[in-house]
C-alpha cells in the first residue's frame, strides 16, 4: 500500500528530456527513478526518436511479427553468449511464467535476484542491469533493457537450448523492438564520464551504492518520508522500496552537489 501511495505522489509529467522531468506546473525534477532502469539512458534517447518515428510511419505499432524481433534476439545473443535460447514477451509477468515452466518451479518477482540491490534470490533467475560489469550466471536471465515502451518487450534468456516450439515468444510491436535495439546499442556510448565519482556517496548513512544503483538499507517504514523529502528538493527517487534508485548519467555540478548532500543528510546525516 505504501508503495502505491508513493507512486501516486509522483507529479504528473508534461515532458521528459535526458534525466530531467517537467511536471504540469513547469517544475523540474532530476530523475533517479528512471522507470526502474528502463530509462537508464535518459528520456528521449539520442538517435532513438527518428527510428521510432520511422517505425510508427510504417505502421509497426501493433503486436505483429516483424524482422525487428529477430534482430533484437540476435543482439541479445551477442551480448549474452553463454545463453542458448532467447524469447521476447509483452510483460515481465509473461517472462516469469515462461521461466517457471522451464525451471519446473514457480518463479515470482521476489525470487528474482537483483544485482542492483546486491541480492541473489533463489539462484535460478536473476536480472541483468547495465553498468555493473558482472557476468550473469543464472539459469534464466531477465535483462532490464535500457529503453522499452511501457516495459515491452520483456526478454528472457535461457542457458539451456530450448526447442523452437517451446515457450514461444509473444509478438511485440515492431516499434517496441526498435526501441529496445536502440537502447542496447546506446549502452556503448553511455557514461563515458560518470558525473558521480566513487566518493560522492561514500559514507552516506543508510544507503548502499553499487555502480550507479543506490538502495536504502534503513527500515522500510522510514522510506516514505525520505522519498518525500527528496521530492521536495526536486529529486525523484524510486517510489518502490528498496528500489534501487539510479544515479543519472548526466548532471550539472549543482545537481551533483544537491544529490550528494541529500544522500549524506537523509536519513541521519
Image (spheres, grey):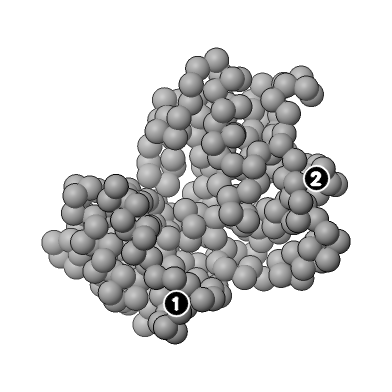
Q: How many marks?
A: 2
Mark 2 residue crowding within 10 angstroms, few (<14) / some (14–19) / many (20+):
few
Circles 1, 2 touching at the beta carbon (< 8 Å): no
Mark 1 lies on a secondary structure that is: strand
Q: Is residue 146 above or below residue 195?
A: above
Q: CA distance from mark 1 to mark 2?
A: 34 Å
Which residue is painted at 21% across and 61% down in the image? 225
Q: Which mark is residue 260?
A: none
Q: Which mark is residue 23?
A: 1
Q: Is residue 118 above or below residue 240?
A: above
Q: Residue 182: where, in percent of width, then height?
A: 71, 59
Q: Is residue 171 left or right of residue 211?
A: right
Which residue is painted at 69% across and 57% down in the image? 179
Q: Is residue 8 left or right of residue 187?
A: left
Residue identifier under label 2: 64
Q: Residue 43: where, in percent of width, then height?
A: 57, 68
In this orientation, which residue lies closer to the viewer: 116 or 200? 116
Q: Quadrant of residue 33?
A: bottom left
Q: Is residue 247 left or right of residue 241?
A: right
Q: Residue 257: where, in percent of width, then height?
A: 32, 77
Which residue is painted at 54% across and 23% down in the image? 100
In this orientation, which residue lies closer to the viewer: 198 or 89? 89
Q: Is residue 220 above or below residue 41?
A: above
Q: Quadrant of residue 81?
A: top right
In this orientation, which residue lies closer to the viewer: 152 or 195? 152
Q: Is residue 151 above or below residue 98?
A: below
Instruction: Indicate the quadrant containing the C terminus: top left, top right, bottom left or bottom right.
Output: bottom left
Mark 2 lies on a secondary structure that is: loop
Amino acid at each position: 500500500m505504501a508503495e502505491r501511495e508513493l507512486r501516486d505522489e509522483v507529479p504528473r509529467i508534461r515532458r521528459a528530456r535526458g534525466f530531467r522531468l517537467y511536471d504540469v506546473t513547469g517544475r523540474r525534477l532530476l530523475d533517479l527513478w528512471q522507470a526502474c532502469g528502463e530509462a537508464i539512458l535518459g528520456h528521449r534517447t539520442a538517435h532513438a526518436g527518428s527510428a521510432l518515428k520511422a517505425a510508427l510511419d510504417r505502421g509497426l505499432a501493433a503486436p505483429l511479427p516483424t524482422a525487428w524481433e529477430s534482430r533484437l534476439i540476435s543482439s541479445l545473443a551477442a551480448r549474452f553468449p553463454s545463453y542458448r535460447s532467447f524469447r521476447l514477451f509483452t510483460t515481465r509477468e509473461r517472462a516469469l511464467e515462461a521461466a517457471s515452466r522451464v525451471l519446473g518451479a514457480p518463479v515470482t518477482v521476489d525470487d528474482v535476484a537483483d544485482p542492483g540491490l546486491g541480492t541473489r534470490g533463489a539462484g535460478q533467475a536473476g536480472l541483468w542491469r547495465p553498468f555493473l560489469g558482472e557476468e550473469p550466471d543464472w539459469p534464466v536471465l531477465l535483462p532490464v533493457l535500457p529503453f522499452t515502451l511501457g516495459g515491452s518487450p520483456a526478454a528472457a534468456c535461457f542457458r539451456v537450448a530450448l526447442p523452437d516450439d517451446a515457450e514461444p515468444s509473444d509478438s511485440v510491436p515492431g516499434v517496441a523492438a526498435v526501441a529496445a535495439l536502440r537502447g542496447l546499442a546506446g549502452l556503448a556510448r553511455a557514461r563515458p564520464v560518470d558525473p558521480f565519482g566513487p566518493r560522492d556517496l561514500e559514507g552516506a548513512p543508510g544507503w548502499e551504492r553499487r555502480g550507479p544503483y543506490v538502495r536504502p538499507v534503513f527500515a522500510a517504514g522510514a522510506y516514505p518520508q525520505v522519498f518525500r523529502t527528496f521530492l521536495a528538493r526536486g529529486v525523484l527517487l524510486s517510489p518502490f522500496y528498496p528500489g534501487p534508485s539510479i544515479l543519472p548519467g548526466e548532471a550539472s555540478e549543482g545537481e551533483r552537489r544537491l544529490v550528494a548532500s541529500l544522500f549524506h543528510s537523509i536519513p541521519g546525516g
